[in-house]
Amino acid sequence: MDFDLGEEQVMLKTSARDFLDKECPKKLVRDMMDDDKGYSPELWRQMADLGWHGLAFPEEYDGVGSSFLDLTVLLEEMGRALVPGPFVSTVVYAGRTILAAGNEEQKQRFLPAIAGGETIMTMALLESSGDLEPSGIAVTASPSGQDFVINGTKLFVPDAHIADHLICVARTKDGTGEDGISLFLVDAKSEGLRVEVLSTMTGEKLCEVTFSGVTVPGSNLLGKLNGGWPVVRNLLDEAIVGECAWMMGGARWALETSVDYAKEREQFGVPIGTFQAIQHKLANVAVEVEGATSIVYYAAWAIDENDPGKTLAASVAKTWCSDTYKHATFEGIQVHGGIGFTWDHDMHLYFKRAKSSQVAFGDADYHRERIAQLLDV
Amino acid sequence: MDFSYTPEEETFRDELKQWLTMHMKELPEWYGRRDIAGPDVDSQEYHDFSVWWHRKLYDAGFVGITWPKEYGGRGGTIMEQVIFYEEIARHRAPGLSNAHGIGWCGPAILAHGSEEQKKRYLPKILSAEEIWCTFYSEPEAGSDMANVQTRAVDGGDHWVVNGQKVWSSGAHVADWGVLLVRTDPEVRKHRGISYLFLDMKTPGITVSPLRNITGTAEFNEAFFDNVRIPRDQVIGEVNMGWYVAAGALEFERSSAGTAIARENSVKGIIRLAKEMGHNGDPMVRQKLAQLYVETMVLKYMALRGLTHELREGRPGPQGAVSSVFSMEFNQRLQDLAMEIQGPYSRLVRGSKHAVDHGRWQHDFLRSRGNTIETGTSEIKRNIIAQRVLGLPRQ
Ligand SMILES: Cc1cc2nc3c(=O)[nH]c(=O)nc-3n(C[C@H](O)[C@H](O)[C@H](O)COP(=O)(O)OP(=O)(O)OC[C@H]3O[C@@H](n4cnc5c(N)ncnc54)[C@H](O)[C@@H]3O)c2cc1C
């Protein structure tokens, strides 16, 4: 029995923390919120050189061959630093999907390029309903000779404006159910594909992607024809746990920053941290953050082991982390008083991120209902 | 990260499982029933039952698993102790008796007692031949435990004790008790306390039961009127009793097992919701799922705490964190169990139509004590803020 990070994971965590403290200061985070591209090509290159992009890919695809848990540890630190850019879109949404469902040729074509930091990718999943279920997928891909022709609009697609390729989740058969959904690798420069960046509270680049008769060769079908949904579902487990790690890292930052402030800031002649109202707020957040750390590592472990309980674990983690990150940053602002409400203080960067992460891949209510179903309530 | 057990640990688990399967057949008929409608928990019959079962576990070598062999323990590992709690929970078997002896008094003797004291008292604590209770709290010393006023005066070869204790669980059935007393009123309050123990048959002790909100009398108040305690019946040094009382507790280790017991309770309440036809209600579904989320978080938090202890040789800061969460979780669970029963939640044990013979009603009422006993939630939050987060004290 040994349930915590191992020595190498602790080293990875420490070195990622040191690197990001130096190379990803809040100034960069803020600059990228207003930047058209939304990421720093220099930081991107450095992270790729450190092997981060290929961390959880096998060595045969130029990866490091580490576990999903290792990637989780890295994402925790990236969430703490609020690293801007398409890392998660490229490595998790696209990379892990290709690894799981791609044929050998597709893996060889894309994974080494991702690992090397040479390509940016994303997944186009959600549509106007915002629905995470198969019923939310209405974009169609119709066969035309050896090719497929995609029509329809995807929404909330992260980083599509800078992506070289997108994975599009589309209907290849009429209906609203699971059956008849397929995945396609689409060149972002294809004719008929239009990307429009939406303005977000966090500065993350979410896009509307319109497909007007976009033709993709049949060889770009990813996985089985009409059998795409299980692939999406599998990816969702990983994406959820990845998001949770990101949230947990941010929540811990909010807790630590608030604790530090409560020790320094004096009112009534004493540090505000001596007031019990402040102590108990922070103690509550500490309980939640400790819990988040434990459940996220467990959920990542379940993915590595392909444990039958991994979907349940992902939902449990997302429910918990959605509430934790929100509470940590809500209380974070409160503990800081007026300063916490300013644009200049960094707390709002995390607070906004907490709100957007809360609804990413389903909020706590959504996951509680999913848990109820999985437990056969 | 590795959730597996060593072959030795698996062997221990198999041995325990076999033992439980065989001996649980001997449990009384009322225990096997889901409603557990047996004798009242404060009755002599219940006490005898729980000591009987405890003795069987003891004879089979399952009590005091990490305690040294020379004091009647098994000399086993922390993991074996954890496996014990896990399997007891999984089999829904009765737990140990002599909770205060094993959880508080014994560990204090083990950590601070003399060799002679260890040899004399520990084996009989483990075997439950001698039941122990704790006299810490007083009317003026609850959360502020260092404010104890019960006085022990040096009488040469003995102490003379006068004062009052309160909330003393099980004092009515105890053979021995540990007693926090003031031995030096002149120094700062933490410095003048000693940790004595006494035979409950000593003249001058009056124990009278206090009924708690469930209606049963599990705790008592106790009066000490010129009670003479032999001089050597002190654990640790004289005037150092505060530090003995504040030492490590056995229950830290049971948290992994508790997590499994809590998981069982969540399954129980899901069954209840189905039986009462409320499982389709979206609000109820949300609340049940939230409870499940919390049990999972609790479980993995406990396992991380355990890992910390295995790696570092001492419990980590997660202890206070899991404790406050676990206690409040149980209150939320019991409250929801009542809510799900609608008007039936008003019917108690003995009533016609009472759900599961009123066990939920009892458990709901009893759960209100969870955030008071072993230190209130507020005190535990103070500890988290000050000792885990390092915030300044007032
Ligand atoms: C079921 C049960 C079994 C028990 N068994 C035993 C036993 O066997 N032996 C024994 O010695 N004792 C026992 N106790 C007593 C228990 O340890 C005390 O009740 C507990 O420590 C609280 O003390 P109190 O009741 O005096 O409450 P108080 O200390 O008066 O507390 C009242 C309220 O004030 C709050 N408060 C107090 N101080 C602070 C502070 N510094 N900051 C914030 N809030 C504060 C408390 O949290 C609580 O909400 C038992 C209690 C219960 C309920």
Image (tube, coloured by chain):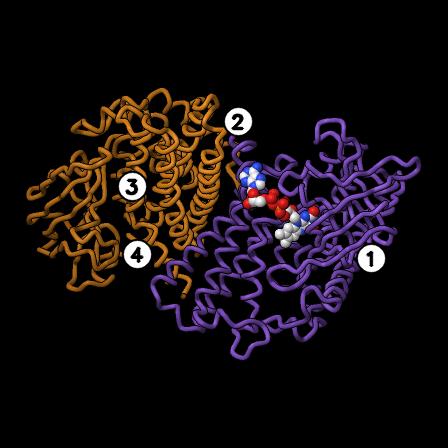
Chain colours: A orange, B purple
Q: Chain of mark 2?
A: B
Which residue is found at the position 8% from the left and 55% from the top? A144
Residue that badge 1 annotates: B129
Camera-side residue of B252 and B304: B252
- How crowded pointer 2 is (Cα within 10 Å; few <14, some 14-19, many 20+) is rated as some
Dot 3: element: helix
Question: Of discs 4 and 2, which sits in the foreground?
Answer: 2
The answer to whether residue A79 is left or right of residue B79 is left
Of the numbered discs 4 and 3, the one sitting upstream in the chain is 4
Which residue is found at the position 21% from the left and 51% from the top? A130
Where residue B171 sits, quadrant-wise, is bottom right
Q: Is mark 1 within 8 Å of ligand 1?
A: no
Mark-to-mark CA distance, 2 and 3 = 31 Å
Question: Of discs 2 and 3, which sits in the foreground?
Answer: 2
Dot 4: element: helix
In the current view of this chain or complex, which residue is farthest to the bottom? B352
Question: Of discs 1 and 2, which sits in the foreground?
Answer: 2
Of the numbered discs 1 and 2, the one sitting upstream in the chain is 1
Mark-to-mark CA distance, 4 and 3 = 28 Å
Q: Amino acid at mark 2?
A: Pro
In the current view of this chain or complex, which residue is farthest to the right? B157
